[in-house]
Image: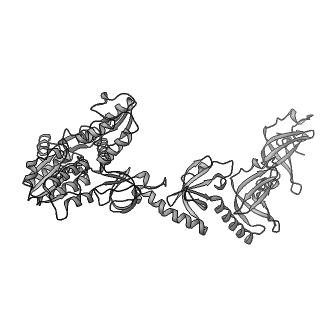
Amino acid sequence: MSRVTVAQSAGFCFGVRRAVDLAEREAAKHQTLYSYGEIIHNTHETRRLEKLGVRTAECTADIPDGAAVLIRAHGVTRAVYEELEAKGCTVYDATCPFVAKIHRIVEAESKAGRRIIILGSKNHPEVLGIAGWCQNAAIYESSEQLLQALDELGLPPETPVSVVGQTTLNRASWNISVKILKKRYTNCKIFDTICNATDERQTEARSLAGRSDCMVVIGDKKSSNTKRLYEISASLCPHVLHIEDATELGTSDIEALRGLTVGITAGASTPAWIIKEVSNMMSAETRIETNEDFAAMLEESFKTLNNGDKVTGTVIAVSPTEVQVDLGVKHTAYIPVSELSDDPSYKVEEHVKPGDEIEAVVVRVNDLEGTVALSKKRVDQLKGWETIEAAKEEHTPVEGTIIEENRGGIVATAHGVRVFIPASQTGVPKDESMAQLVKTKQTFYITEINRQRKRVVGSIRQIQQEARKAAAEKVWETIEVGAEYEGTVKSLTSYGAFVDIGGVDGMIHISELSWGRIKHPSEVVSIGDHVNVYVIALDRENKKISLGYKRPEDNPWNIFTTNFQVGDTATVKILKFMPFGAFAEIVPGVDGLIHISQIADHRIAKAEEALTIGQEVEAKIIDINDEKKKVSLSIRALLDGVDEE
């Protein structure tokens, strides 16, 4: 009997699984989905996707105008995006997030005027794609090639150099190359872009190969990361088989494994079903055993998860679109960002980090591919129902985020549960838009729950009413004539303005709004204005408050007497004519009379013979009647040679 160990990291990586899932989803929506290049380097998987309607195109010329196009996991050059946009294509980007990050790095570094060095396979699509996001990138496949090229170039030590690597690059090769570059250039920026999953896969392969008599490496011959696994295994293990599927594992190969310690690993683009086929074939033909029954171990690693199952896992990777979770089984589990929270302000990087333990619910299982889609917000919803129900029973407030507006009201999410708040309960006046509440946090009461229909109704208005009632009680406890408040204008009538001074409404009579004459309160204030008012009268029995808005320091007469006295000259504006003269504005709110005898140095029959409405003239103040608030003016007194007497 033999001992067989299957690498835990064998099979689809995060980026590959993401690309395949996206291809499946979009292929179901489109009659034909064009993939720019092979989605992943695995012939079997490519053929399977072809049956679903995914057609591989080697260049943009092979893609019809307006077609649906999937960008492969390896990524493409900027030029490809521009060509597809020019053709009017709908693009679905399956570029691995870790590869897309390299694109952003080289683009920024190149724009900064730095030389870009890419360590990786020159003709690999990932490397070609990276090179297409910067200017004049230099690509080196080995440390030996790098050293030779640098000697030939003879660049000065201060040359600004930025270095990235293919995500599946051999870690040992990367380390040697980086050491060379650091010694050669003093202005060298190193970006370690080797994927963590690649590191883990290669480290596990290295450990497994070191303690095995034979290694079986499963993966497409075109797969770069599978080749790396083969190279690592071959450097440490005397006998290594590189196969693409179970059909390449001959009877003689299986017989040769008897009595040996065997390690099995697989490339990042190898589907789980191929690994399972190989393992099943070995088990059936040779009855290979491990320290635990191999078949049982295999079933455990591929055990089926059911939709609705609640699971707990560890976060192993976070991208802008998904969170990858280790469930301790063979399935590659992930949570789309949309399934993390209903809160539109939720930021993944602030709430989820690698190493965090996370609870989720299984929403979709693909046993064929060994992937499972999870939802965290559904777990939150399950817990949230209990919190929501308790809040209704105990009549306690709930805080939630408003996520949308509809015809009948708004929708909030609280503790993962959707809560409908009718328009009448939003607290927003009928003539105002409820859209102002979207994306804001609000506190509300739960007024109705129907768990079978998953219907929850809430009320912001009840919270506001209670708060207003409490505030009103506090105001009535302390209010007195002369007290000053900052209030908000709530409504206007022909006779005044109603102002909320903190839970209680008071009225400013129109006569108290302005020192001058006004026809309507809207000439002075508008609904929503914040105003400073003071109490001029109280009726506690009928709960009525009269407010003042005019202030003594704003009294036009006070302003006038502070700035002018008899004998002063003022620039005045002619307002209207009378049979006995003309009235002119001295300061806003204070007029003076220019008697007809004081308009000119000669006799005139009426004021309009010498003046016009709106005209500004210089006039002398010849009398001030403080008791009657009247002012007499004279233009004649300022004319040369004329005595005001």
The answer to whether residue 176 shows anywhere in this view is no
Residue 609, above or below 217: above
The answer to whether residue 317 shows anywhere in this view is yes
Q: Where is residue 406 in the image (x, y as percent from the top left)?
A: 59, 47
Q: Which quadrant would residue 575 be assigned to in this image? A: top right
For residue 392, side relative to residue 315 (left or right) = right
User: Outermost residue, bottom direction?
Assistant: 477
Residue 221, above or below 79: below
Q: Which quadrant would residue 106 be assigned to in this image? A: top left
Q: Where is residue 122 in the image (x, y as percent from the top left)?
A: 19, 40
Of residues 505 and 448, the one nearer the viewer is: 448
Q: For the point 60% across and 68% down, which residue is it?
A: 393
In this figure, what is the number of numbered marks?
0
Of residues 472 and 42, the one nearer the viewer is: 42
Q: Position of residue 546 (x, y in %)?
A: 80, 61
For residue 161, side relative to residue 405 (left or right) = left
The colour style of the image is one colour
Of residues 173 and 397, the one nearer the viewer is: 397
Q: For the point 91% across and 34% down, which residue is it?
A: 604
Q: In which quarter of the image is the N terminus?
A: bottom left
Of residues 586 and 52, the one nearer the viewer is: 52
Q: Where is residue 146 in the image (x, y as percent from the top left)?
A: 14, 44
